[in-house]
Amino acid sequence: MSVRVTLVAATAVALSAALAGAALAAPGAGHDATREALRAAVREGVPGVTATVKDGHRTWRATEGVGNLRTGEPRSASDRYRVGSITKTFVATVMLQLEAEGRLSLDDTVHRWLPGTVRGNGHDGRKITLRRLLNHTSGIHDYTSDEEFGRTYFLKDGFFAHRYDTKRPAELVAIAMGHRPEFAPGTSWGYSNTNYVLAGMVIEKATGRPYGAEIRDRIIEPLHLHATSVPGTRAAVPQPSSRAYSKLAPTTTGPTYDVTRLNPSLAYAAGEMISDSSDLNRFYRALLGGELLPPRQLKAMKTTVEIDGAPNDGYGLGLMERRLSCGVRVWGHGGGIHGSSSEAVTTPDARHSLALNFNGDWAGDTDAVVEAEFCGDARGATRPGTRLGTR
């Protein structure tokens, strides 16, 4: 079972490596396996990769491949990119801060905050707590798996006709309500982007402000995350940045399309944010280091539930725990959205962190890069993707 999510159904097959261009990397020692894993991703078809490692006071940066297939311009270690479901960790952090302030409880029901929003076809917001939204045990259907939504936003004809559409959060939830729940609340685990659309709506109801403003004031500005933003409906990715590419098809062959510009409201609080690798490392190190949450809330965030078929992974509240092949444990999240696949992980002591991005969504294996950095070789197995979000 794969729980990686990438806004387009995709597995790894090759785009010609000749298009990848020359490698570029900052000087660094002890990262040979990581560098080789980045090169392997490009050989497998990823146009370009950027990665940054922070280990204690040392920083290592590397890029491979290109950021622009037309010009051959290489990727930059300073590239900003769409982080997809890494957004979820930011959203969960804000909700836990609100709980610490006594403004809501994770044991509140969705109905209490959004009366009548989760209902129909067996969905009942009176039986779903905010905690179950954050750890994906709500059973709520994932709106991104709706066939019509997929044709409209993930496939070529639909994407180019609708890439600039604005989707309201309530519209995304309504799509999910058109389907039966996946399971009764609290009885299983199932990744659903709808959970975090609802979480964003709850934050707005509890604060009276856009959820992105709360992320900005509570996380982005205090941590000085200068490359990080919640774009709302803004279609462009701020510079410096590379182009983003997709097949816009259920196959991994065929033409490659530039999908850099899109209206990210289709992802909202489930995956709309933009950042860079240095900012992501700073965020996860601050989070795991106790800078953003009191001990009680951080403990709740790190309380995981089992993921069927992934015995080495556990999902907390917008945060995933992974046990790597060498026994090292890391915390973080993955994220995918059109033309972008990202990963950000940090050791429990917040000392050693890695953040990376592929600017293509149909090839490569971010797990192999994580394994290489923390275990010394690229032993991660390629796993297929589904839609918008995480591993």
Image (cartoon, helix red, strand yellow):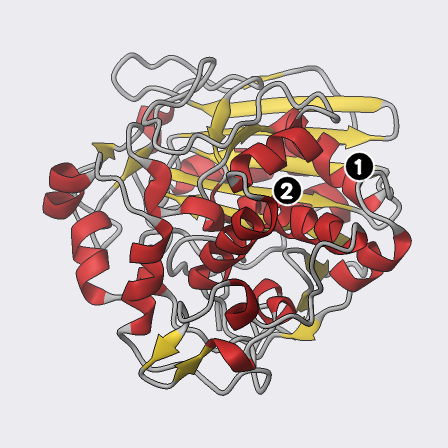
Of circles 1 and 2, the one toward us is: 1
| Image location of residue 33, percent across then percent down | 67, 38
Q: Residues within 10 Å of mark 2 (few under 14, many from 20)?
A: many
Say what amino acid the circle numbered 2 marks.
Ala
Res 316 quadrant in image: bottom right
- Asked whether residue 78 appears in the rendered view, the answer is yes
Per the image, label 2 sits on a secondary structure element best described as strand
In depth, the one of 51 and 333 nearer the eye is 333
Q: Residues within 10 Å of mark 1 (few under 14, many from 20)?
A: some
The disc label shown at residue 286, or none: 1
- Asked whether residue 9 appears in the rendered view, the answer is no
Horizontal relation, residue 55 to residue 282: left or right: right
Relative vertical location of residue 3 with respect to residue 234 in this rendering, above or below:
below
Say what amino acid the circle numbered 1 marks.
Ala
Horizontal relation, residue 358 to residue 224: left or right: left
Calculate the distance from the C-alpha at mark 1 to the C-alpha at mark 2: 13 Å
Relative vertical location of residue 340 with respect to residue 101 in this rendering, above or below:
above
Which residue is rendered at x = 57% and y = 50% of the image? 203
Q: Are marks 1 and 2 in contact (CB under 8 Å)?
A: no
Give the residue number, with chain letter if any, for mark 2. 344
Earlier sequence position, callout 1 versus callout 2? 1
Which residue is rendered at x = 54% and y = 58% of the image? 391
Res 387 quadrant in image: bottom left
Res 199 quadrant in image: bottom right
Per the image, label 1 sits on a secondary structure element best described as helix
Horizontal relation, residue 125 to residue 228: left or right: left
In depth, the one of 281 and 140 nearer the eye is 140
| Image location of residue 97, percent across then percent down | 74, 48
